[in-house]
Amino acid sequence: MRRLLPPACLGILLCTTSLTPIYSAVADDTPAVSLDTVTVYATRTPQSSFDVPVMTSNIETDAPGNALAGDTGDLLEFTPGVEVANGPRRNGQTVSIRGFDNEAIITLIDGRRQNFEAAHDGRFFVDPSLLKRVEIVKGASSAIYGGGAIGGVLAFDTKDAADMLQPGQDFGVYTSMGYRTANEEYSPVISAYGRTGALDIIGIAALRNSGNIRQGDGSELIAEDNLLSGTFKIGYSLNDFNSVKFIYQGLNNDGQEPNNGGGAITASNPVVDKKVTDNQFGLKYEFEDPGNSWLKPKLHLYYNTTNVREEDISGTNLGRVQIRDMDTIGFTADNQTVASVSESQKHTFSYGFEIYHDEQTGTITGGGTRPGVPNADATNYGFYLQDEIDVMTSAGRFLIIPAARFDSYRSSDDAGNSQSEHKVSPKISMSYLPTENIMFFSSLAQAFRAPNLTELYASGQHFPAVPPFFPANFFIPNPDLRPETVTTFEIGAGINFDDVIADKDEMSVKGSWFISEGNDFITQDVNIFAGTTEYVNIPNARLSGFEVDARYQLHPVTAKLGLSYVEAENRDTAEYLSNNLPLTFVADLSYNATALDSIFGLRGRFAAANDKVSSSQVATPGYSVYDLYYRWIPSEKGLETLTVDLGVSNVLDKAYTTAYAGLLEEGRSYNVRVAYKW
């Protein structure tokens, strides 16, 4: 049983939470439920998010407010330390964590790496309707996930049959219909799922049809999407301990928007017919015997293929067709061994192997190579070992986690250029809990990112000349580009108490400060007067910042608060880098009116001016934006599986841009979703 917070700690906590804002979970009927969540990806073993020596965020996609999300930006908008870049067009959205962009983040969907790369398009394509949760691990994670995890891990998990079935139910059907006014989007979803004996199966189909996006200043952003996506999973238990699962996820989006969805329409960024086709296949095997502490193997073979076809329907290249293809085939083998040295000391060894191969092709009308999209391929493989040492002493509990991974990669293009490198990524992290209510943690890690195929081998014209101001601009390949290497030190603390201010309330706060020293940061150097674009290394860079995540619950009120800040600079020139994240608050407050079968919520995002910018950026003013949401779940017999969600996003119709976007975000939108389980 947690104890009442001591007065001194209470004062510190109140000072911290007074500076912090929110995102909420649904309040339950009395008694109050625990606010602690479980992280699956932080250490590759299920752990309390409070206990682990890392900052994480968990987003339940069907929670009130989140269920109205139309895209990734809506889903992640109220997560501290996270920015969704490139504006409101869904095809162009990318994610940054702690100032590190999508290339320095490993993105997973059901464990499959999302390696599609494009300067003007998103890195992954997934509809929120297919997801059950999103977990974000913040900070260097290359020691167990390999190259590309400098900023962290963004993990999407899609829904399973078990997530949809009611207690005692073996078969069910789910239907929903949603509508958003800002882009006149309707979004029907249908799903069927069931289990019989050793077999379980689920199929989900989601449609989104939307038009131009009304922005906060009243103008319209050209964007049209006709998106059909779906997931199919079939699992089979061979016996009590062995199971296999086949997963298919597909998406087809036929729409109209500029070639660069994150930019304004210009002569060099014309409107195109854009067709995105993404198909992903996975086959998983797991062995889990509770009586076997040495073997818990998980094998995963997957294949992703993504095709983006763009046909100019305006501008000087009317009728031109440009295509980008990326295929990834990967395999992972992971195992865990638990060894109990004594009653007070336990070791959980996680170890495994990963290999994946990427192949990219770019074509343009006439059969040539698409400019900026080299025909190239890369093969990566790695081995990792981690030991979670859990020690109970008279002074409290220690969780000590050393880990290291060896990675090797080789890439080449059709022009004969190639690169081959290998890296070791070590990490040591530790949590100390003098009591179950208080924790301190720190970590020291080295992570790296290999240059991607475009950064190494891009060639051809980047953009046309604008006489007499500057000549046409051309990509210059740089096969000598070195991998980024970043050393990150992080220190933090947390408190987690019941009965703090009132009886049966709960409060949890966790925060950290971090500093990342980077060598050979990769950046794009555009020289408009020389007519060249080349990816180059910045020898010395530094990112530093802090993050606080807080929750409070006193039934029927639930609150979550978040605060984050990142400052980035070139240490040799003292100039700011484009990785800066201004002081940003996120806030969510919900009220569970059980007598009305209703939940009412208000959430906000508050950002200071983004004025610490690089020479290639434009400073943007600060902003505050608010959402309202409401959920009705009737308790009357026959209606208990009905859910009605209503909401208003950007209530004040604010015209604003986020830190990494050049376009105004979506204006006020009235949103509705009605769902029913049969």
Image: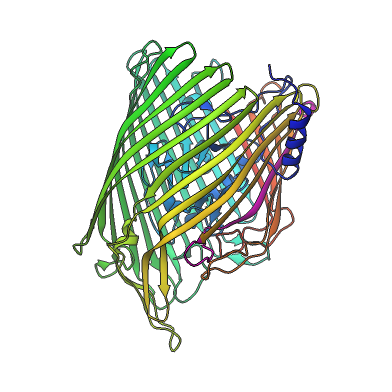
Which residue is more in the foreground, 604 or 179? 604
Determine if the magenta segment contains residue 593: yes
The colour scheme used here is rainbow
Q: Residue furthest front?
A: 395
* Residue positioned 65% across, 41% down in the render: 65
Q: Where, quadrant-wise, is the N terminus in this rendering?
A: top right
Q: Where does the image place residue 410, in percent across and percent down from the top left?
A: 24, 51
Q: Is residue 179 left or right of residue 290?
A: right
Residue 191 belongs to the span the image colors magenta: no
Is residue 285 at least partly visible in the picture?
yes
What stretch of residues is rendered in magenta?
Answer: 570-597
Residue shown at the point (73%, 22%) measured from the top left:
29
Residue 17, position as x, y percentages in the image:
73, 40
**Nearest the camera: 610 or 537?**
537
Q: Is residue 5 above or below residue 525?
A: above
- Residue 539 position within the rendered picture, expressed as x and y whole percent measured from the top left: 40, 61
